[in-house]
Amino acid sequence: MISYAECSARERIARLFDANTFHEWLPPSERITSPHLAQLGVPSSFDDGVAIGRALLGGREVFVAAQEGAFMGGGVGEVHGAKLVGLLRRAQRDRPDAVLLLVDSGGVRLHEANAGLIAVSEVMRAVLDVRAAGIPVIVLVGSANGCFGGMGIVARCADQVLMSDASRLAMSGPEVIEASHGVDEFDARDRALVWRTTGGKHRWITGDCDVLLDDDVAAFREAACAAVNGSRPVTVESLEAEHLQLAARWALLPEALDGDVEALTLWQRLGVPKPEEVASMDVQALRALRTD
Amino acid sequence: MDWKTLAERLFGSDHGLTAEGDFITGDVRFDGAPLKVIGTTGHAPIGVQLALAQARVVLDTIEHHPGCPILLLIDTQGQQLRRRDELLGINRAMAHLGLCLDLARRRGHRVIGLVYDQALSGGFITSGLIADACYALPEAEIRVMRLPAMARITKLKPELLEALSQDNPVFAPGVENYVAMGGVRALWQGDLPLALRGALADAATDDRRAADGAARGGRKLASDVAQRVLDAA
């Protein structure tokens, strides 16, 4: 078993797709780097922290982007974002079987704040253009950094989210919330609390991810092969169903509770029989909790 | 600008917009045609509830008022920074709002954003930034975060960021910078109804922001890099 979380972006690509089928666009040899980092005295990267291209997955052509969390936390800057947008536009034109986004990102790269914010919103619109063309967009969340900020929104704009129990998906990081509203609001050093609030197990129980996986590249590959078949059109009906689900969930927790019991209370109200056992349950046992 | 002053200048004193808490909504007639207005005020933090409230109106508009243009009035301090909102999937609620607005566009509704006071990061990304086009009043403020906070998180010297922000729109808050980068199409000055009329007539449904950013010199690479991906062998 090879840990997906411990792989680099390029290792993930090499192991996830059919052997030696990845063809990269704008590879590091082209040295397309951020124009903004040098003047800040920050080292740049020849791929600006994201590898994009096409590959085969179980013999089917897919487009892929893999963010490198080791470079600026996978933050989206001007060039990084433009590579993602270019890939998505190309998918609209060339119509691969699917687009896979291997997300490893804290969201907007603060060093390029304004450009990064606009870039993330351009990625969002481009993702929805690809979906509207009937091409599934699959997001894989399995890195140690997880998927935060604007990329947390992008993930939920996709057809499907595949996630491991070793990764996290959210909007604002616990540190940001603690800095804003104090340690009583969110103790960022309380690891168990952080995982109950943002971790893969929680996202599985709530339905925020479509598939829960072990932290294993082979498991991600198998799930990705299956997900490629599923385009989920955005319709009034699908959005009404989503709205109903989100509103019902909000109603399950009408007021904030103490951090020790908040997540467990929600899980119990979502029908988990023994919420106190979730932390120690393995992926297989957790899968049995959801029947949809 | 106060939202009521804005509403009066846009639609006259019987504008019919109402605020419930931080949430503004209303059906107005503009140039004799219906227009749906959805907005926030009081620098509202956008949490799950406020995202859902906006999404509800968008869905109702799609279902009951086919083709009716939607005007988003934006004043937000950003996403709600609360643990409960994270637990309940604030990113998913935001995405849901974005998907609703995107579907409205695809169903033929014009979607126009106007930053009339303040817009920050998470609260802005699935409202004004997902509209067909986003505009701003000159006195509005748009940013990801303040320079001191940015300096703290990036571990860069505040003086360095301050100096760079003088001539590089990427670092500095301000609506002019967002115009230069293409994130805001134009500023609305003087005759606001005239500006809205122009926006409703002009709103393209393709995403022109990278091209605007290149043409205006505020975001020189985004458009070119995306094109290079399309052209790559």
Image (tube, rainbow, N blue to C red):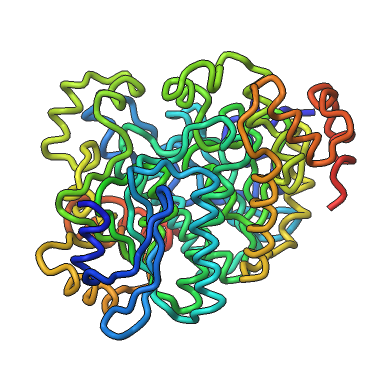
Give the image quarter of residue A209: top right
Residue A222 shown left or right of residue B36 in the figure: right
Q: Residue furthest top?
A: A189
Hey, which residue is sitting farthest front in the picture? B14
In percent of width and height, residue A236 lies at: 62, 71
The image position of residue A46, as x and y in percent, is 39, 36
Measured along the vertical axis of the image, is residue A187 above or below residue B103?
above
Percent from the top left, x then y, of residue A121?
41, 52
Frontmost residue, A247 versus B203? A247
Left of B7 or right of it: where is B66? right
Q: How many marks?
A: 0
Res. A259 image quadrant:
top right
Residue A1: percent from the left, percent from the top? 80, 28
Q: Is residue A50 visible?
A: yes
In the image, residue B154 sits, relative to residue A170, either above or below, namely above
Q: Nearer the viewer, residue B75 or B183?
A: B75
Identify the residue shown where x is 57% and y is 54%: A157
Residue found at x 76% / y 53%: A225
- Give left or right: position of A258 versus A265: left
Residue drawn at point x = 39 percent, y = 33 percent: A45
Q: Quadrant of residue A58?
A: bottom right
Above-or-below relation of A62 to A67: below
Residue plotted at (87% across, 49% down): A291
> B88 or B33, which lies in front?
B33
* Residue A19 visible, this orientation: no
